[in-house]
Image: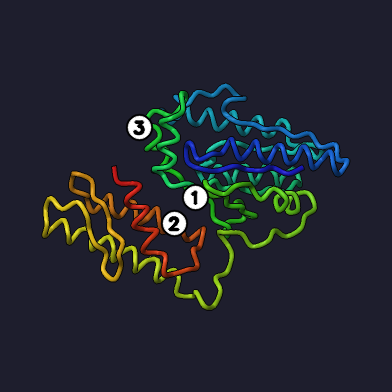
Amino acid sequence: MPLIIISGIPSSGKTTRALEIKKFLQEKCEQEKKSFRIHLINDESLHVSKEAYRAAVEEKKARGALMSAIERVLTKDDIVIADAMNYIKGFRYQLYCIARSMGTPHCTVHCGVPTNEAKKWNSERPDGYEAQIFDELVTRYEEPEARNKWDSPLFTVLWDDPTVPAEEIWNALVLKKAPPPNLSTVSKPAIETNYLYELDKVTQDIVNAVLEEQKSNLGSYTVTIPNSTMKVKLPARSITLAELRRLRRQFVNINKMHTILDISRISELFVQYLNTNFS
């Protein structure tokens, strides 16, 4: 039966989503009178410490333990949820090959979240990743792409989505129906064909406005955005170009997945994003 590959940066809600999927599958199997066994495999069930991600050798052992556990239980009567970061595309390809060799379908569930939000959640957890490990894992994360056969079908779940697309996952993997277009693959309506252009242009204009204000008015703590009533609230320090580029890249990536469609709100939402993530 299917292999469900969960993927996301540290503290992006992967286990929460995996448990939602497991609960739905258990209820669905009971409702449909299907006797599939459902396995949730993650670092906790394998007794893998977060410290394992500090060194490459130990991390490789952790991935090996996950793969071995999946191979042991993946059969025609078992549904396996691989609840781990699965952040290396080459490793996701290996998992795809395991499913393919057994003639069973698979899918990828990507937990999308802004890095600062995940970092906040991580800091609030008693068993969170150490800051250096967290940052290194985020840097190395290779986001799933629907055009890759090993990531497809891909279901993207954002941090503020109320539920996972469980029914669509069931249809794609158990009923073998083609999944509906999701946030990462849906075609934009013709009226919004310039959405990505505007997303890129508006965010770059705001970055330029912040840099220009800092250059000409040292000590200023607000930046008025041209043709807008919105203001960027600067912290009591200089914001570097690298930091602005990083935040802009994160915002653009999130909104490529979760298209706003209302182009007029791009400026407002990017300013809010900057104000929330400046520390």
Q: Is residue 74 left or right of residue 62?
A: right
**Amino acid type of disc 2?**
Asn
Gap in angstroms between the C-alphas marked 3 and 2: 23 Å
Badge number at residue 132: 3
CA neighbours of label 1 inside 10 A, class few (<14), some (14 to 19), many (20+):
some
The residue positioned 39% from the left and 28% from the top of the image is: 130
The residue positioned 22% from the left and 58% from the top of the image is: 223
Q: Nearer the viewer, mark 2 or mark 1?
A: 2
Q: Earlier in the sequence, mark 2 or mark 1?
A: 1
Q: Please, which residue is most extreme toward the right here? A: 33
Tell me if residue 235 can be seen: yes
Residue indicated by mark 1: 143
Q: Locate residue 124: give its quadrant.
A: top left
Residues tagged 2 and 1 counted as in contact (Cβ below 8 A): yes
Q: Is residue 109 left or right of residue 255?
A: right
Residue indicated by mark 2: 253
Q: Nearer the viewer, mark 3 or mark 2?
A: 2
Q: Secondary structure at mark 2?
A: helix
Q: How is the image coloured?
A: rainbow
Residue 5 position in % (x across, y down): 62, 43
